[in-house]
Each structure stands twice: as C-alpha cells, then as structure tokens.
Image (cartoon, helix red, strand yellow):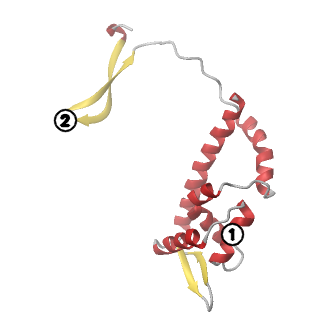
Amino acid sequence: MSGDNLRRVTTGKMQGQNADERVTPLGETERPESHDPPSRDAITESLDPVIDDVVDGETAVDDGLVTQSLEEILLAMIAVADGGTHGTGLMEELEAQFGAELSPGTVYPRLHELEADGTLQMHELVQTKQYGIADDAAAKEQIATSAYQHLALGLFLHASLDAL
C-alpha cells in the first residue's frame, strides 16, 4: 500500500506536545472473510441442554473457577438463603451446588473481607456467626458484573465449539 492511500488519525492519547497518531487506510480495503455470528435464538437453543444440566446439579464446576468468583457466589447464596446463613452451611451449599470442596481457610477470609467492606453484616450467635447482606446495591452490582463477565466468556467458548 503506497503512502497515497494512507491517512493519519489521532488516537487521542498525548505524548509530549503532540497527540499519538496511527496510520489507517483510506477508502475500501480488502478485509479477511468474516463469519456471521450465530443468531441469538441459535445460541439460546444450543445452551438449553447446558442450562438444564446446571439447574439439575449435574455439572460440577472446577474448584479454581468457584474460588475465582467466590465472593460473588457467597453473596448470591446469602441473598437467596431462607433464614440465616453461616460459614459451614455455605461450604456445604458450595459442595452441593458446584461439587466444590473448599476449605474454611478459603471461605471464611472472603466472608470477613465482605464484612469489612460493608457488603455483608455478621451476627454473632452462641456457637456460630450468621451472615446477611448489608449493602444490597453493592452486592447486586458485584454479582451482576461477575455474571456478565462469566456469561460473555461462556458464550465465546460455547460458540467456538462449532469451529472444532
């Protein structure tokens, strides 16, 4: 491509006195053949068996993945729990729901962090501590952000299966 077919475009970043520039082609250029993304209906239909397996508890999740999103999972479990929740009950629920066997040394520090930042509240009972949501908005935002990130990754990975 000759210099006549190029133009400089400001990226908006500044270095010294001049904005950064990059060279972009003018007019039409050949682009690699792209594949049309699958329709939303096709994605939804292809995910139905996966969703059924998850709802039925037939899909174990790697402990590492559960640990990476442990704070959001704990918040969600506490939010939907009927009555009080305590650390041992949460660990039992993690195992029942995801097949994840996490140690108290993994779960309790996360509960303490969520309490320290004001998202959870803790009530000391005679022999246990009971947890509840203290800041609904913060918990909702944290869970939603994690859910959308996981959904985006999951959809990307699922869509790639067609290429194999």
Circle 1: element type = helix
In the figure, 97 relative to 5: above or below?
below
- Residue that protrudes farthest toward the left in the picture: 17
42 sits left or right of 151 in the view:
right
**Which quadrant of the figure contains the N terminus?**
top left
**Is residue 117 shown above or below 57?**
below
- Residue 89: image quadrant is bottom right
Q: Where does the image place residue 75, in percent across and percent down from the top left?
A: 60, 67
Q: Please report the residue visible at 60 percent of the width from the left and 44 percent of the height from the top.
A: 152
Foreground residue among 136 and 55: 55
Residue 119 in the image: state x and y as whole percent: 51, 71
Question: In the figure, is residue 7 to the left or right of 95?
Answer: left
Identify the mark nearer the N-term, 1 or 2: 2
Badge 1: residue crowd in 10 Å (few <14, some 14–19, many ≥20): few
Q: Residue at x 68, y 69 (%)?
A: 80
- Looking at the rendered structure, the kind of residue marked 2 is Gly
| Residue on which the image places disc 2 | 16
Q: Estimate the x, y position of residue 106 in percent, counting from the top left.
A: 56, 68
Label of residue 128 in the image: none
The residue that disc 1 covers is: 80
Q: Which residue occupies 72% across, 76% down? A: 82
Quadrant placement of the C terminus? top right
Using a 10 Å C-alpha cutoff, classify the residue at mark 2 as few (fewer than 14 neighbours), some (14 to 19) or many (20 or more).
few
Q: Secondary structure at mark 2?
A: loop
Give residue 16's position: percent from left, percent from top.
19, 35
Left or right of residue 129: residue 23: left
Q: Amino acid at mark 1?
A: Val
Q: Is residue 25 above or below residue 19?
A: above
Q: Choose top left, top right, bottom left or bottom right for residue 24.
A: top left
Q: What whole-number distance in Å separates the C-alpha atoms at marks 1 and 2? A: 53 Å
Instruction: Give the quadrant of residue 84.
Output: bottom right
The mark tally for this picture is 2
